[in-house]
Image: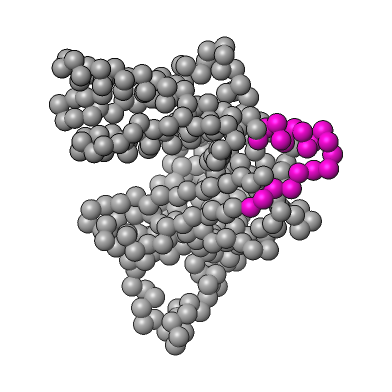
Amino acid sequence: MTTKLNRNNKIQENNSVSEKLSEIPVSVSSFKTKIKLPKNQEKHDAIVKYLEQSFGVARKTYNILLAKKKQEYDEYLKAQKNDTETETFKDNNGVKKISLKKWFNQEKLKPEYFYITQVSKCVANEKVNDFNKTLNQFYKRLKTNTKIGFPKFKKKGINESFRIDNISFALFHNNNKTYVELPKLTERIELCEDLSKNPTLSIVGNYESDTNIKIYFTDGNSPIKIVNIMSNKYIDNSNLIDENGNIINPGSLEITPVVSLLPFKFRWLSEGNLKAGMVTYCYQLFNVHGTETVTSPMSELIHLTNSVTSQGSSEYKGTGLNKSSNKSVMLSTELSL
C-alpha cells in the first residue's frame, strides 16, 4: 500500500517581474514512499482502517459533488434541447462557474455522511479542490464547443488517493527511522525510507518588490537560508565569494545568522528627555532585504531620575511616574562579526 504526501509552495507574481520569477526554481518538498505497517495487530488494524476511511471519504466527496453537477448538467442539456433558458450552467459569457465548497460544507452535515468527520478535514477539502479543477477543465472545453464527455464517477479500489496539506501532518525521525503523524490517527506510521539520510531540498520564492525577490531554501535538517536574487552584492565581491564564484561563508545566508552579540555597556548619562524609571537596552543587526540576527543580551539596569548624580547619595531621589528625568543614556558595544 502506498500513500502520497505533498507539500506545495507558491510564488507570488507581479507583471513587472514575471519573466524573472519564471526562472525561479519553485519547490517542492515532495516525495513518494511506502509505509511499514506495525506487527501489533491492534495498531495495524487502526492504521489500515484510517487509510481505508480516508480513501473512502475522498472518493465519496468527489462523487457527491459530481452527482450534484451531473444533475445540473442534465437539466442544462434538456433546456438546450427544448430551446429554453437555464442559469445553471450558462451566463452571458458562456459557462458559469458555481462554487461548491459552501454547499458541500452544509451537505456533509447530513447524518448519512457522518464518516466524513472521522478523518482529517483536509481529505474532503482537498478533494473539493480537485473536483473544481476537473470541472473547470470541463467548463473550458464546453465553452469552445469541444465535444467532451462529463467527468466520470470514481470507483472503489481503482487509483484511490487522498491528500493532507503540509500544515496538518508532521514528520519525526527516531533511531534511524522516519514516522509520519496524521490528524485524528493516534498511531504514527513508519515510512520504509529514512528521510533524514536522504533530505529533500525545499526552495520557495517570494516577491516583495522589483528589487527584493527572496529565495528561501533548506534541506529540512539545517537552518533555513535566504538570498535576495535581485541584490548585486555577490557580484565581483572578493570578500563574499571566492574565485570560483562560491560563497565563502554559507552561514551568512542563514535567516538567523550565528553570531555572538555582546550586551551594551553603560557609559554615562547626558541631557535628554527620557521618562523616569529603570531602563535596559538590547539590539539586533540586520541586512536590508536580507537576514537578521537574534536579539543581543540585555544591558544592565539603568536608573533614571531628575536628581543630579554628582550631589551624592543623600540627595539622590526618585521622580514621579511619567515625569521626565531630563536625561539620556550613552551606550557602547563591540561588534565581532
For residue 163, side relative to residue 183 (left or right): left
Query: Which quadrant of the structure image shows residue 49?
Result: top right
Magenta span: 33-51
Determine whether 329 is above or below 53 in the image.
Answer: below
Which one is nearer the viewer's eye here, 170 or 31?
Answer: 31
Q: Position of residue 277 (x, y in %)?
A: 53, 42
Q: In this view of the protein, which residue sits in the foreground, 110 or 225?
A: 110
| Residue 172 pos. (x, y %) | 69, 49
Picture colour scheme:
one colour
The residue depicted at 41 percent of the width and 62 percent of the height is: 25
Give the quadrant of the N terminus. Answer: top right
User: In the image as oriented, which residue stretches furthest toward the top?
Assistant: 111
Q: From the viewer's perspective, is residue 201 above or below residue 63?
A: below
Residue sitting at x 64%, y 63%: 198
Q: 155 or 125, which is in the foreground? A: 155
Q: Residue furthest right?
A: 40
Instruction: Write the residue at 63% across / 52% down.
Output: 33
> Could you tell me if residue 261 is visible in this image?
no
Question: How many numbered circles does the render carry?
Answer: 0
Report x, y in % for residue 262: 59, 64
Report if residue 209 is visible in the image. yes
Q: Magenta span has 43?
A: yes
Q: Position of residue 246 (x, y in %)?
A: 47, 80
- The magenta stretch spans residue 150: no
Residue 279 located left or right of residue 205:
right
Image position of 75 (left or right of 171): left
